[in-house]
Image (tube, grey):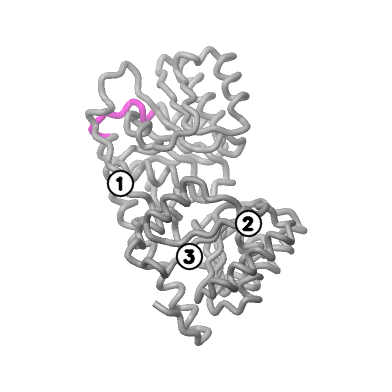
Amino acid sequence: MRILAEAAAERRGSLHFVVISGGGSARDRIVEAGHEVTCLDSKASVYSIRTFLAVLRTIRRIGPDVVHTHGAEGNFHGLPAAFLAGVPVRIGEEIGLPGHRRMARLAFRTVYRFAHRVVAVSPAVKDDLVRTGEVAPGKVVMVENPVRRVTPAVPGERGGRPRPRCCFVGRLVDWKNVRSVLDALHDLLGRGRPFDFWVVGDGPQRSELVNVVRARGLDDYVRFLGFQDRPEDCIRTCDFFILPSTEQEGFCMALVEAMAMGMPAISTRVGIAPEIISDGETGWLVPARDTGALTEKLDQVLRLPREVAAAVGAAGRRRVLARNTPTEYLRRLDALYDAVSREHRVQVRA
């Protein structure tokens, strides 16, 4: 939302952001970009009637031409509320792979009927929505997330260390599968090919991962840096970026941002990775949940001459900047809103 707000700064007055709970620092940045933000300070739960009524009242007060909802609670409350408020164009967006059980699938199948289109942020998300039956195939469109404007990494910033340094950025939860990188590091250490591993982010699995590091004697090789407001400052001091997630990964903004910096990236075949990484050309891919394959790929990549790895990183940067800029994102959204308005013969104000 911050990227969207900053990219559309010249459209002051045309965008109104509504947050179910509190806004935090993102709210401040959106306001600085010249847009209005309404924080409902409501319960972020699909089970809250009060939240639904607050969303409905807010949409009626604003009177928008388009409502574009994001995420589970936003979709669940926002789409029916927009329908009841008579909003001409209603767009939902699924930002991940929720893994809904039967009753939740039925609930969201009903909710998505109030949408004219449902945006999926990657082919993996699109396939999941169709496979689970939550959205009809013809109703799903793919619009990838935009990448922030980040300064490219400078090769000289990463030199002068005895070991290569790899970086992960994300929440420390089971499906991010950071444990597999620790297993690979332990194996490569036994082969005499160690690397330093920086873990940027926090989450419920942190204590478990710290215990694994201690038990395996990896304390000198692994650093837990916690949540960082500017993770790019950590990434640019590294040699490689690693995304070891399982199939639950829907997009992974951290991977795209790292590649936008020119950072050579190693990723499992999840989320948006297969779309932006051609193995050996714009990065490297390994199967999800295959620690052995990850270990062998790391062994291979860490042996590459610096200039070869830098060339792969540069190719990855070009690939991302050709398809994930904020300008391209706005163009795709405008085209989507226009297509729906023409299809349903409604007029959307500029």
Q: CA distance from mark 3 to mark 1?
A: 32 Å
Residue 162 place in picture, x, y as percent: 32, 16
Residue 253 place in picture, x, y as percent: 45, 47
Front position among marks 3 and 1: 3
Quadrant containing the C terminus is bottom left
Magenta stretch contains residue 302: yes
What amino acid does circle 1 point to?
A: Arg
Relative placement, left or right, of 135 versus 150 is right
Magenta residues, dominant SS class: helix
Q: Label 1's element?
A: helix
What amino acid does circle 3 point to?
A: His
Q: CA distance from mark 2 to mark 1?
A: 31 Å
Nearest to N terminus: mark 2 or mark 3: 3
Relative placement, left or right, of 183 versus 151 is right
Residue topped by disc 3? 16
Residue at 39% across, 47% down:
277
- 61 or 251, which is in the foreground? 61
- The answer to whether the residue labelled 3 contacts the one labelled 1, judged by CB atoms less than 8 Å apart, is no
Pointer 2 local density, CA inside 10 Å: few below 14, some 14–19, many at least 20: some
Relative placement, left or right, of 273 versus 316 is right
Residue topped by disc 2? 72
Residue topped by disc 1? 317
Pointer 1 local density, CA inside 10 Å: few below 14, some 14–19, many at least 20: many
Residue at 30% across, 41% down:
262
**Magenta highlight range:** 300-308
Residue 299 place in picture, x, y as percent: 41, 26
Vertical arrangement, residue 331 with respect to residue 161, above or below: below
Nearest to N terminus: mark 2 or mark 1: 2
